[in-house]
Amino acid sequence: MPRRRTTSARASATTLLSLLAVLVGTIVTGLPGGTAHAAEAPSTKTAPLAVTIDTLTPSSLKADPTKGTVTVSGVITNDDTVTWQDINVYATIDSDPLTTETELAEANLSAADQSWGDRILTYGDFMTIPEIAPGQSQDYTLTIPRADLHDSSHSTAVAEQGIYRFGVQALGNTDNQDRDTTADGRARTFLPLVDNGAGEQPESAALVVPIRQRVLRHSDGTLVDPDRWAASVAPGGRLDELLDFGEDHPVSWLVDPAVIDAVEQLAAGDPPRSIAPTDGTSPGQTDKPSGSPSVAHRTAVAGTEADTDDQGAIGAAQAWLDRLKTTLSSSEVFTLPYGDLDLAAAAVHDPALYAVARQRSAAVMSALGVDNATPADAPIDGYLPASGFALGSDEPVFLSDQAISGDAPAVGLFGEHRIYTTSSAVATGGPPPGDRLALVAVRQELLAQAALRRSTGQPVVAVLPAEWTPGSDAAGFFDGLGRRWLQLTGVGAATEVSPPQELTAGRLHYPAAERDQELPASAFSAVDDLRQAGTTLQAVLSHNDQVATAVLDDALTSASYTARGGAGGAAAVRSREAIDALLRQITVEAPKSVTMSSTTGRFAATVVNGLDQDVTVKLRPVTDSGITLSTPKKLDVPANGRAGVLLSASAHTNGVHTVTLQLTDATGRDLGTDTSLPIRTAQVSMIIWVFIAAGLALLFAAIVIRLVRRLRRGTREAA
């Protein structure tokens, strides 16, 4: 990284360039020679240099302008196609502080190239980078004496309390462009000035870190993109960085247990959905599988070994789970409905699904060994209509301050639900340009919001975005929050002194854009169909009592907030079709036709099991009113085997009756396979018996007559 070195030729050139920059600033501003600030001309072009602010120390100013320094550092990247040269890097600060939330909000929403404040041009407070080639980056560091933090409208350093816009600007030139006064790269953030008097209570703030992510599985139950999951839990991955960020720090956690299940599945080798026995009946199996009920049934194929990459993923996943358990067990934890259920859509299309998702969340957290979790609802964008509150009973709800009309209270009450109002500004991050959710941007926004609320005593509760990636400088982030005037704590502790305010449905703001994004009815229909299919599959399998739970979990993730914008339950449809295909491997065979010579009769049918597991099924006859069939209560069929069954028929009318034999599970749910056959019954058999009887009577009568005649003839001859 280029630096001013007074002992080198380059340093001498840099010094000259710096003095020239000061002179340029003097000419532009029209101030007397030696003035240390220069205003920026309006921008009319896209900035070719990208500037980041990666560290800012201290994170807030004290009132005394005579002590200390401010150090800011980051990276400048050349996004242009030409080399940029003689790049001067300056700090900038606003002339007057922001003192209201409206002013702060406007500053957050202002254009990235908006002119504000002046550059600090005091010799030694800026640096020069000789050149940056296209696509290359260079680090910068500026250390500015506290006394130099003032702009051209002030002769002394800033000392008025409030929020100051603070930034970094880079100015350079190319072979095709002369130097001007317009910044070629910018970054900005907020720098609060807070004078914390002796004995003053610190401002309370709570930071909620979400563990929520799209969980999607193939139709066989394996994870979609397992490499992404492996990368996420490996060192430097997003989920790994979340734990690095939050462990050993006073944060609260917002957890979707479906994510935990997905990582547990990865730790088990990402096996597919299994229909193998889970009740201890398979050879060598004496106990049920341990672990999450959702993962226990996913049994790896016997005799196979994971390759090196798989072993690495398995190890990383297990290590992450171990760390997660330790971290959550000693923290404030809120759990979402399993799969991060789309609450607004569920309230319309399937309200009963909420209780199912809640039960699954509790089971997963219990299996993980975390017993200190509180069920809570947190819509992913912070908005929830009044109907969404009817799903639960008294679970706390995290709502954005934008979801409440008027002045949003820190804590609200809607029915039995306690509402924690969260800061939309912190969730959005710092002002543009650049990564608004970078660590420094989020931290300085949180400090700015907390500083403004000191006069009201209202706490700041901030829920970070769903797929936020914190980066690697967690220590610097929390060190910057370690201010005497700020206390970072859990949600419960931060809000305990805030009296809740009753809220009516009329104050709940639910934008039309949110309603348009809700999952459609087709998604919940697909979820219900998949749940039914899983229940049927488990009922058919003689020795598996867990596969329905796995299928349920796959179904719930299709009703997730993270599934919005998809094909309305397409993943659930694919999984249901795969299960239907399994069930169709159990078939029934019957004669092509049956003829009964009386009103009752019997005939044989055969159930064929194409699965490699024992099944228990029933035959359900579907007939017309002229005939009835009786079948066994249930039929056990061995794996890849056959079982015969004798059916009894009873006809009430003569003629041909079409009978359909349907296969069902033990409770009568259709498996989707059947066969039909005609049964011919003949009431004419009664007539036949009449003729036979008449014939026999005639025969006997003829015999009797002949015997009588013979006896008479014998008597006459004897006489």
Image (cartoon, helix red, strand yellow):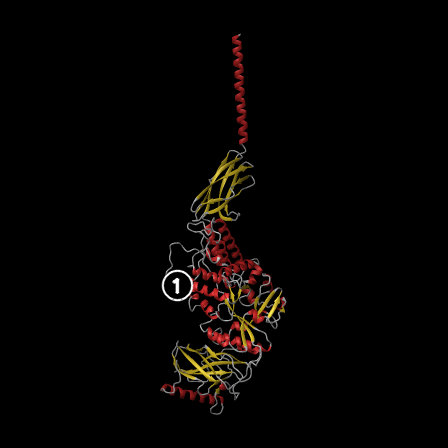
Task: Give amino acid for label 1.
Answer: Gly
Secondary structure of residue under mark 1:
helix
Name of the residue lying farthest toward the bottom? 32
Compared with residue 169, is residue 263 higher up or lower down, i.e. above or below? Answer: above
Could you say where residue 259 lies in the image, as x and y percent from the top left?
A: 48, 63
Please tell me which residue lies in front, 390 or 393: 393
Task: From this view, report whether residue 562 is shown above or below residue 195.
Answer: above
Which quadrant does the N terminus fall into?
Answer: bottom left
Judge by depth and name the residue closer to the eye, 619 or 298: 298
The quadrant in which residue 225 appears is bottom left
Report crowding for label 1: few under 14, some 14 to 19, many 20 or more residues within 10 A (C-alpha).
Answer: some
Task: Give residue 505's position: percent from left, percent from top.
Answer: 62, 66
Is 392 drawn above or below residue 47 in the view shown?
above
| Residue appearing at x 52%, y 11% in the figure | 714
**Residue at the outermost left position:** 9
In the rendered view, would you say 228 is above or below 204?
Answer: above
- Camera-side residue of 352 and 133: 352
Tally of marks? 1
Residue lying at the far top in this picture: please name it. Answer: 719
Asked whether residue 308 is in view, the answer is yes
Can you identify the residue that label 1 sits on?
312
Looking at the picture, tell me which residue is in the foreground, 423 or 590. 423
Q: Position of residue 10 (x, y in %)?
A: 37, 85
| Residue 105 shows up from this direction | no
| Residue 89 in picture, x, y percent from top left | 44, 82
Left or right: where 387 falls relative to 51 = right
